[in-house]
Amino acid sequence: MACPFQTRMAVKVNADGHLLVPLRDSDGHQHNLQTIGQRSEGPGKTFLKGGRKTGLFHLIDPHKQVGKVPMVVAEGYATAAEGDRSSPVSFTTPADTCIHSLI
């Protein structure tokens, strides 16, 4: 069962305890999945092999109305999630950490 944070943030956790972050285009279609594990487990972030990253992002709280509130682009998921939790604006994180891919 997902905790309220996971439900609101549109992420899931797999059996290994890794965070699963869907990466979507501006039309809302999912093209990739980012897996975020503990730093002590080696590579903390992975993507599906051969999956698209350019032009994709994860909107932290999809229930906030995109286009109705300002959007802030954060460098990583943790930064975006923390900012989104404490602000009325919408936070997103780009899949390839290149802001130009969202413009």
Image (cartoon, rainbow, N blue to C red):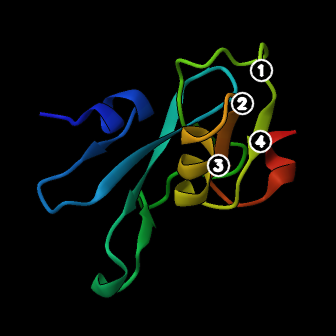
Relative to the observer, which residue lies in front, 47 or 2? 2
Q: Quadrant of the N terminus?
A: top left
Residue matched to label 3: 93
Q: Secondary structure at mark 1?
A: loop
Rounded to the nearest angstrom, the CA distance separating label 4 from label 2 is 7 Å
Percent coordinates x, y for residue 84 in the rendering: 60, 40
Q: Residue at x 32, y 54 (%)?
A: 19
The amino acid marked with disc number 2 is Val
The amino acid marked with disc number 1 is Val
Percent coordinates x, y for residue 69 in the rendering: 77, 20
**Does residue 62 lie above or below 97 as drawn?**
above
At label 3, counting other C-alpha atoms closer than 10 Å, the crowd grade (few under 14, some 14-19, many 20 or more) is many
Q: Is residue 52 visible?
A: no
Whether label 4 touches label 2, CB < 8 Å: yes
At label 2, counting other C-alpha atoms closer than 10 Å, the crowd grade (few under 14, some 14-19, many 20 or more) is some
Rounded to the nearest angstrom, the CA distance separating label 1 from label 2 is 6 Å
Residue matched to label 4: 72
Q: Residue at x 36, y 39 (%)?
A: 11
**Which sits earlier in the primary sequence, circle 4 or circle 2?**
4
User: In screen coordinates, is 92 left or right of 48?
Assistant: right
